[in-house]
Image: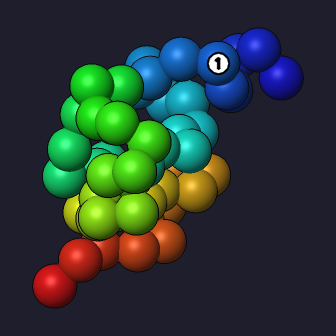
Amino acid sequence: MEDRVGSLTPGKLADVTVLDADVESLPVEALAGVDAWLTMLGGRIAYRSA
């Protein structure tokens, strides 16, 4: 399984979410206002914002 997951490398499956903010720098109260731009599951796009 290590040859298919664990890093963002060509040929590996990706579970990734791209957000519109740096959530590590936001206060907890602001997290509800963060939007997802893109979600990939198993290397395939599962969600893309309009």
Instruction: Give the residue number, with chain letter if any, for mark 1.
Output: 6
Location of residue 49 (image quadrant):
bottom left
Q: Quick one: 20 or 5, which is closer to the camera?
A: 20
Residue 38 in view: no
**30 left or right of 43 in image:** left
Q: Residue at x 48, y 71 (%)?
A: 46
Q: Position of residue 20 (x, y in %)?
A: 19, 52
Question: Could you say which quadrant of the image residue 4 lies in?
Answer: top right
Picture coordinates of residue 2, whole percent (x, y)? 77, 14
Q: Nearer the viewer, residue 34 or 28?
A: 28
Q: Residue at x 47, y 56 (%)?
A: 40
Q: Is residue 14 above or below residue 3?
A: below
- Left or right: 29 as drawn, with respect to 7: left
Q: Secondary structure at mark 1?
A: loop
User: In which quadrant will I find the N terminus?
Assistant: top right
Question: Which quadrant is home to the C terminus?
Answer: bottom left
